[in-house]
Image: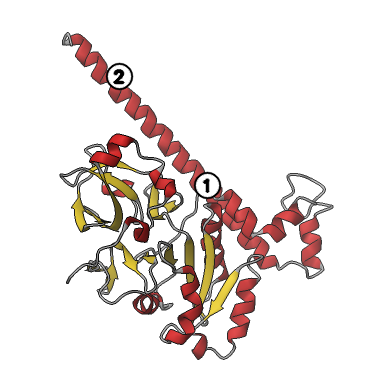
Amino acid sequence: MTIQKYTRAELGFSAHFMMQLDLDEVEQLIPMRICEVQRSLLKGLGEEGISLLTTPSNRSTRDFGVGDWVLRNNQNQIIRRLEPKSVLSRRAAGTDVSEQIIATNVDTLFIVSSCNADFNKARLERYLALAVDVEVEPIVLLTKADLAEDAEYYLAETQDLMSGLTVLALNATDQKSLEDVYFWCGEGQTVAMVGSSGVGKTTLLNNLTIAGGLTQEIREDDAKGRHTTTSRSLNPIVGGGWIIDTPGMRALRLYDKSEGIETVFDDVTSLARQCRFSDCQHETEPGCAVREAIDSGLLDSERLKRWGKLLRENNYNSETISQARKREKAFGKMVNRIQSENKARKGF
């Protein structure tokens, strides 16, 4: 397959990244955009096409995300990662206490749900908080609207989740239905797409992207014998933009997203600030503005529960990752001290 060549501007290289380069780097190093991250390798896309990239000795592939801009030398080794303008990340799945990069340098987040039993407010609120916290515009795409008995119901329920939210109900298999989506897919723009399996993400991706794309996805059998995509990739969109698919993300565990949660739940947080007591738990305390709103029908009690659950989870995950970072820093200092002492004893 012949890979089309793109200019840096078409790839999304902007003044934000150019200002980070010094003169020597401009003359000697080559900017590349990470277009695929797998467990053991990185692929970068530049003006000359795709290259396999090696990481510095002190870094691993998990330190990079699809969408990153990096500088490589003539041996295809990454010299450094440029500071991204946005980073979508989560706490890693399982028992791993670390940050996992979902995508970087994203302008818009397409949050995909469907007009059927998969529709889940709590899941949507998580994705909204993730996007808002890093100042990425969230757009909710409700698929399978053509199959729903009452698509307007799902539209209204979604729009109530956050003030000013853009929600589109569409048929992912119909190109005419996708016309409004291309507004966020212009030249040099990058969108990421998230959502649970079965909501039509693959159909959307196939219909939004240029046939053939850039890379072939790697697929493995999971424990139940089903195929699951294990790599993330950057794909060219019809019209000049780029889309990052995020396959295989079974859970979204937030951390350090307090500002995003507050914005998404601004109706609850504004009420909470009116409570008589600053530490009000919104249960049986007198003068609780939140409970009064629920009793009068102005606030849904289920939304209050989802807010509380998300806050507790965010605080817990933030604390455990912070503790892990402190342990890693302390361990690094100990290693450096031992190495220095060994060198001193050997007379270096």
Tell me, yes or no, whether the two marked residues, 1 and 2, touch with CB atoms within 8 Å: no
Disc 2 crowd rating (10 Å Cα; few below 14, some 14-19, many 20+) is few
Q: Quadrant where the N terminus lies?
A: bottom left
What percent of the width, then of the height, locates residue 200?
A: 41, 78
Instruction: Please state if 98 lies on the left or on the right of 231 as rendered.
Output: right
Residue 197 position (above or below residue 262): below
Mark 1 / mark 2, whichever is N-terminal: 1
Could you say which disc has been placed on residue 256 in the image? 1
What percent of the width, then of the height, locates residue 272?
A: 74, 53
What percent of the width, then of the height, locates residue 252?
A: 45, 59
In this orientation, which residue lies closer to the viewer: 245 or 207? 207
Q: Which residue is mark 2?
A: 337
Amino acid at pointer 2: Arg
Q: How many marks?
A: 2
What percent of the width, then of the height, locates residue 254?
A: 49, 53
Element marked by disc 1: loop
Amino acid at pointer 1: Asp
As measured in the structure, the alpha-carbon distance from the residue carrying label 1 to the one carrying label 2 is 31 Å
Q: How is the image coloured?
A: secondary structure
Q: Residue at x 64, y 77 (%)?
A: 156
Element marked by disc 2: helix
